[in-house]
Image (spheres, rainbow, N blue to C red):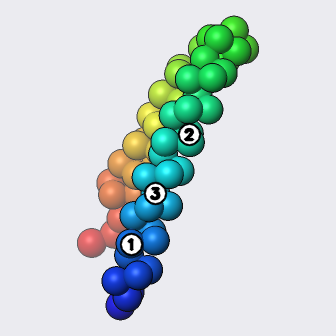
Amino acid sequence: MFSQGQLIFAGFFVVAFILLMIFSYRKDIVLHRKYYRGSLFILLGFIIFIVILFALKVYLQPE
């Protein structure tokens, strides 16, 4: 499906992207604590909403 070169490139890209995201987050952690307080509750709300939609889909699915 993918050549060995493509897989190696994808691996390096993923590692570099994750390291860059960690570095950027660490650099801005003070601003995140100041401006994004309470955003964890919003994320939790979205996750609960998706779970409820999935449960309704499974429950209301005709057999």
Q: Mark 3 sits on what residue?
A: 14
The answer to whether residue 24 is above or below residue 12 is above
The answer to whether residue 1 is above or below residue 49 is below
Residue visible at 38% across and 72% down in the picture: 8
The answer to whether residue 37 is above or below residue 24 is above
Q: How many marks?
A: 3
Measured in 3D between alpha carbons, the distance from the residue under mark 3 to the one under mark 1, in whole angstroms, is 10 Å
Residue 21 numbered mark, or none: 2
Residue visible at 53% across and 50% down in the picture: 17
Quarter-of-image position of residue 34? top right
Disc 1, SS: helix
Label 2 packing within 10 angstroms: few (<14), some (14-19), many (20+):
few
Disc 3, SS: helix
Q: Earlier in the sequence, mark 3 or mark 2?
A: 3
Determine if residue 34 is in view.
yes
Measured in 3D between alpha carbons, the distance from the residue under mark 3 to the one under mark 2, in whole angstroms, is 11 Å
Front residue of 41/24: it is 24
What's the residue type where badge 1 is placed? Ile
Q: Nearer the viewer, mark 2 or mark 1?
A: 1
Q: Mark 1 sits on what residue?
A: 8
Please identify the quadrant where the N terminus is shown.
Answer: bottom left
What's the residue type where badge 3 is placed? Val
Label 3 packing within 10 angstroms: few (<14), some (14-19), many (20+):
few
Residue 56 numbered mark, or none: none
Disc 2, SS: helix
Residue visible at 40% across and 57% down in the picture: 57
What's the residue type where badge 2 is placed? Met
The answer to whether residue 14 is above or below residue 19 is below
